[in-house]
Image: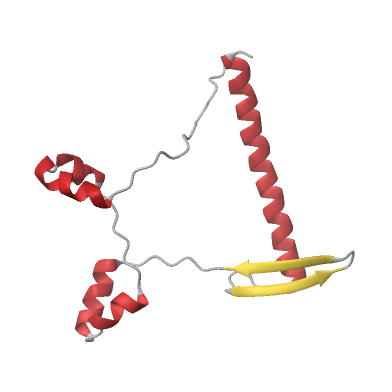
Amino acid sequence: MTYSELCALWMQAKEDEKTAIEHRRAYENKLLSLIGVSENFEGTENAEAPGGYKIKITGRMNRKIDADKLQEIAAEYGLTEHLSSLFRWKPDINSKAWEKADESITRPLMGAITTTPSRASFAITQEQE
């Protein structure tokens, strides 16, 4: 199989995947409506449908925390001691600062960092001839 053939097959697979996801989500939205569940609910709903279908719907809310603001508010209201039990603190590497930092600083800290490869991502486009 040639590079061109693989690229064309990949592009078709991505389009098929996009279409399949759109269809699945439309069906899910119709099911939510039929069952009477709001799209923005949180928790678990179970339902049964004719034909022996059992449906379990789990709703979640995404929450993004402004850590600096949270700490300011906690300090203002004397709640700092509760932060460690109510929130998980997840350090994240500032790659630009890390790369610029002196090795005498970053080398000792490497012992706390595990690096593993992730799956490569692809973007393939085709120029119209």
50 vs 74, left or right, is right
- Residue farthest to the bottom? 78
Residue 68 location (% of width, % of height) = 24, 68
Q: How is the image coloured?
A: secondary structure
- Residue farthest to the front? 111
Q: Tell me the residue at 26%/71% (across/down).
A: 69
101 vs 61, left or right, is left
Residue 47 location (% of width, % of height) = 77, 72
Total count of labels:
0
Query: Could you say which quadrant of the image residue 30 lies in?
Result: bottom right
- Residue farthest to the right? 51
71 vs 85, left or right, is left
Q: Tell me the residue at 61%/28% (across/down).
A: 10
Query: Could you say which quadrant of the image residue 28 lies in?
Result: bottom right
Query: Which quadrant holds the C terminus?
Result: top right
Query: Which quadrant holds the N terminus?
Result: top right
The answer to whether residue 22 is visible is yes
Above or below, comparing residue 86 to residue 102 in the picture: below
Q: Of 21 and 33, which appears nearest the observer?
A: 21
Residue 83 location (% of width, % of height) = 29, 77
Q: Tell me the residue at 68%/42% (across/down).
A: 19
Residue 75 location (% of width, % of height) = 20, 80
The answer to whether residue 102 is visible is no
Q: Tell me the residue at 62%/22% (across/down).
A: 8
50 vs 86, left or right, is right
Above or below, comparing residue 123 to residue 95 in the picture: above
Query: Could you say which quadrant of the image residue 7 lies in?
Result: top right
Q: Of 81 and 16, which appears nearest the observer?
A: 81
